[in-house]
Structure formats: C-alpha cells, structure tokens
Image (tube, rainbow, N blue to C red):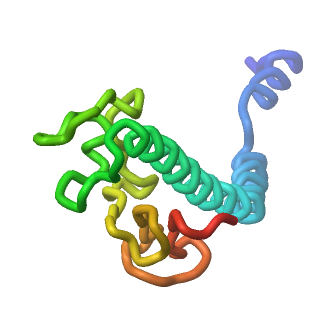
Amino acid sequence: MPRPISQRRRRQQAGLTLIEMLVVVTIIAVFAAVVGPKVLKYGDAAKKTAARQQINAFNTALGGYKLDTSLFPTNEQGLKALRERPEGVNGWQGPYLPQEIPTDPWSRPYIYKYPGEHGDEPDILSYGADGQPGGSDINEDIVSWKSK
C-alpha cells in the first residue's frame, strides 16, 4: 500500500541533498581562501608587536637594574640577572621582572649583548620568524636600538 503524501514529503525534506552539501562546502572554502591570508597577516604583525613590547620591558627592567647596581648585566649574566641575583653583584634589589624571562614569540631566546654595538646600553634582539639575521616582513629582526 502506498504511503500517504504527507509522509513522503517529510521523508524527502528530512535531510540535505548532496548538492546542498557541496554548495555549503564550496562557500566555506571560498570564505577560507579569501579571509584566511588576511587573518594570518594580522597574526604575524601581532608577533612582531609582542617582541617589541617584550624588548621594551627588558629595557625598563635593565634601567632599574643599573640604578641599583651601577652597571648592566654582563653577556654571561644576560637577561637572567633580571630575575636571579648574579654572584658578586652588590646592590641588586630584584627581581626586576614579575615573571621568568620569556622566549620571543617564535619560541627562541632573545639575544642579549653588553657592551652593545649600538650605544651605551645593551643590545637586545630577536631574529624574527626565520631565526636568521636580516630579513623582511615576518623575518625582520626586532631590535632594541630601533623603534617602529
């Protein structure tokens, strides 16, 4: 015996057709292709900004360190001297940073040099996404002696 018309309609309308699914997947793919690269670009810019802010925080902490000890940490002491008292340093009143020394946004340690090559203060830098000196865009070095 044939089914009533109302049951057949409900069964036909119950699910999505293959064509409807393909249309939805195509729309999502086009959206991801158009919007995805723009969103990733902002992520890269955010990492560079975060590195600049961390370097500025190091410079502020190094200023406090120098006020207390009359000198900057040596290369051997490095940024670690902002958290832990180095041996033989008088006047240390730290810690000068509220938390452990972070890595750069690409999970590599910051480079600390004192005496620096760019003035009387220490040089602090991150080599950017590629971890190599030089570069542009996301691979650009973020350094303490230049502000952008």
x and y percentages locating residue 59 in the rendered image: 49, 50
Residue at image point 77% right, 64% down: 34
Q: Position of residue 11 (x, y in %)?
A: 75, 24
Q: In the image, is residue 115 above or below residue 109?
A: below
Q: How far across and how far down the image is residue 9, in percent?
A: 85, 25
How many callouts does the rendering have?
Answer: 0
Extreme-left residue of the structure: 87
In depth, the one of 99 and 43 nearer the eye is 99
Q: Is 63 rendered above or below residue 74?
A: above
Does residue 26 appear left or right of residue 9 in this picture? Answer: left
Question: Which residue occupies the foreground of this view, 67 or 21?
Answer: 67
Q: In the image, is residue 70 above or below residue 118?
A: above
What residue sits 47% from the left and 45% below the top?
63
Q: Quadrant of the C terminus?
A: bottom right
> Camera-side residue: 122 or 144?
122
Establish if 17 lies above or below 97: below
Q: Quadrant of residue 69?
A: top left
Is 139 placed left or right of 123 in the picture? right
Q: Name the quarter where the N terminus is drawn.
A: top right
Look at 78% across and 54% down and name the residue there: 27
In the displayed orientation, state which residue is furthest to the right: 5
Residue plotted at (51% across, 44% down):
60
Left or right: 106 with respect to 56?
A: left
Res. 85 image quadrant: top left
Determine the image quadrant of residue 137.
bottom right
